[in-house]
Amino acid sequence: MSPRKLCFRPLNLLLVVLAIVICVTFRLSKKPSSISASNLGAWARPQASGFHETSPVGAAKVLLEFKESPKCSSLAGESWTRGRLATTAEASDEHAERILAALGEGVRKHRKQWEFVFIVSSLEKLGMLQPGKRGLVFAAGSEPLISYFASFGVEIVATDMDAEGAIEKGWATTNQHAKNVDGLFKENLIDREKFDRLVSYRTADMNHVASDLHGTFDFVWSTCSLEHVGSISLGQRFAINSMQLLRPGGAAVHTTEFILSSLEDTLERDNTVLWRKKDAEQLKDDLRHVGYEIDEFCWHAGDAGLDYTPDVPPYKAHDHIKLEIAGHVCTSVGWISRNPQL
């Protein structure tokens, strides 16, 4: 073999190694610019409780824990006494159809309708919808339950935040704030004379419930309102404080927005607060600790396809049992807590 050939082999090998080094160096120098905070996954860094990195639309799913949880009992003695999640079945079955028809609505398979069904069913079960009973609603808005309950002869005190606060938060411009009693009247549910006799209005701060209301009501309720008080902890405090308004044997029924795609991550921002399973369970434990009664929650998320097909923005007026909020799959949760009889 010639000396010339021997000197080219090391040179060729050196060139190959140099080319590889240049290629690898170039790739590494480009990698940081292709990764941003918006596409880092949960594997890239630990997430603190309450932190959420928005996922692509449709990426989040209902956790198996809620899919495989035992179904809520339909037994007469247990139905509508336990806290539960909104489901397609309970928003559209014959029972729901009856209540929604009484409210002047058709079935739309919407979680807000389920909230009405849940509240009405719970208060019916407890015998609260009859003459002589007295109820109070927080964040009345323009919901039909006020006129509906008054049609049974129930005295209702409707409350909402003051006008200045409603304008600041945007409720006044979206028909979600009641500024006086006139906006609460539903002529298809009750005549005006009976309504005026039974329904009154006053402003109220959900974070500072007035002491003159304590111990004067048979029931209180709120419809997806306590998530707007500022945080999960403030919502829990409100739910406990609302019990002070009840007479012995009275009941509170509340609903709020609930996350199904995580047990840890959530959203606490402006007027949007998403409760987790542990937040509802903590409230249950706290209520029991101070002497109130509340049954175990039923965490079954439903069986229908719609229960696992969340609506995405812009949201529809129907087929809206589950929805996506900032990458989270959410629905509504409701519970009933009771002040024991003396």
Image (spheres, grey):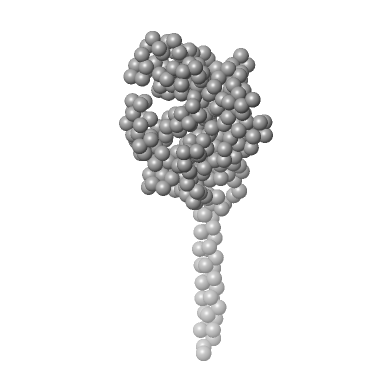
Residue at image coords 49%, 24%: 128
Q: Nearer the viewer, residue 323 or 292?
A: 292
* Residue 160 rendering spot, x and y as whole percentages: 50, 18
Q: Nearer the viewer, residue 315 or 100?
A: 100
Q: Can residue 241 be seen at all in this image of the molecule?
A: no
Residue at image coords 50%, 63%: 23
* Residue 269 rendering spot, x and y as whole percentages: 54, 32
Residue at image coords 41%, 13%: 195
Is 171 situated above or below 50? above
Quadrant placement of the C terminus? top right
Is 212 situated above or below 314? above
> Residue at the bottom extreme?
1
Is 147 situated above or below 88? above
* Residue 171 rendering spot, x and y as whole percentages: 46, 22
Q: Nearer the viewer, residue 22 or 248?
A: 248
Residue at image coords 56%, 45%: 263
